[in-house]
Image (cartoon, rainbow, N blue to C red):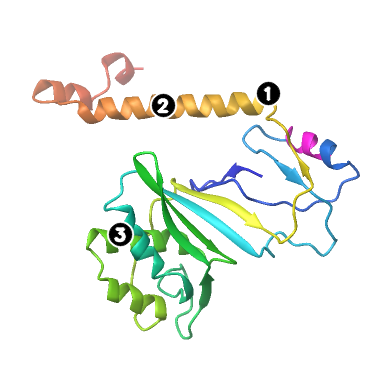
Amino acid sequence: MASRTDRGVSARGNALALTSSLPGPGLLRALNGVAAEIVFTDARVVESSFRPRAAVARTYHYLEETPVGSIAAYREAAGAAVGNIDVRSFGRGLPSARPIVRTVSRFDAKPFGPGLVLEIEAPSFVWGMVRKLVASVRQVVAGELDPATFRAALSGRRRLTLPLAEPEPLLLWEVAYGVPWTVHATKLADRQRAYVHAERHAARVRDRLLERLGSGRFSGDEASKAERPPDDVRSG
């Protein structure tokens, strides 16, 4: 299931459990009529005890559109976080008295266009963990965080106050349950295609407007005119 949260983080790999009398293909068609911005891609019959949170692995992708260093440097920094790590410096609102351990199965960097994508996989994450790990790796690559200090925080020997990387480039890519999906949607519904087209168009327009605003130069009377609304707006 693909969707977008209200915090700017998108998801390609969410799962939903429900009870329905519809067969798999019919259920997918019905679900894809719920909302244009949510796409249901696969389905399977599960036991009543199934819980969507009981995944065996979750994979996040984070787009670094303008990397601060080479892909090799990103891979080296990210590799330090693979294995069992103490996440007290890498989560939000966590108690600090005892170690809180999560196992990172994979943390890698791959080329993507002019930038790169950071891929991180683990059975489970604490709140804010991916964004803080990304921010930490970015700081290590940029020379703003000593690699030894980063490793000390990962082992729990040091506590760090770390920033959160921006939420918009983060994508929950895949959630694995150890069993395959058995029914697959073959195409987007018409209004889903229209929604995707409209969102991409809006993103392009916004990018072009911001580029134009960023290149604009104002001085003297032009600046004062840009800062105040026109007469018909002020008097309306």
First-in-chain label (1 vs 2): 1
- Which of discs 2 and 3 lies nearer the camera? The answer is 3
Q: Which residue does the numbered mark 1 point to in the structure image?
A: 190
Q: Nearer the viewer, residue 213 or 133?
A: 133
- Based on the picture, tell me whether residue 161 belongs to the magenta stretch: no
Q: Amino acid at mark 2?
A: Arg
First-in-chain label (2 vs 3): 3
Element carrying mark 1: helix
Q: Is residue 163 left or right of residue 128?
A: left
Q: Which residue does the numbered mark 2 point to in the structure image?
A: 204
- Pointers 1 and 2 in contact (CB under 8 A)? no
Q: Give residue 153's quadrant in the image.
A: bottom left
Q: Which residues are magenta?
A: 27-33
Dominant secondary structure of the magenta stretch?
A: helix
Q: Is residue 162 left or right of residue 38?
A: left
- Based on the picture, tell me whether residue 28 belongs to the magenta stretch: yes
Residue lying furthest top? 232
Q: Amino acid at mark 3?
A: Ala
Q: Give residue 65's quadrant in the image.
A: top left
Q: Amino acid at mark 1?
A: Asp
Q: Is residue 25 left or right of residue 37?
A: right
Q: Relative to residue 150, is residue 10 depicted above or below?
A: above
Q: Which residue does the numbered mark 3 point to in the structure image?
A: 73
Q: Relative to residue 100, is residue 201 depicted above or below?
A: above
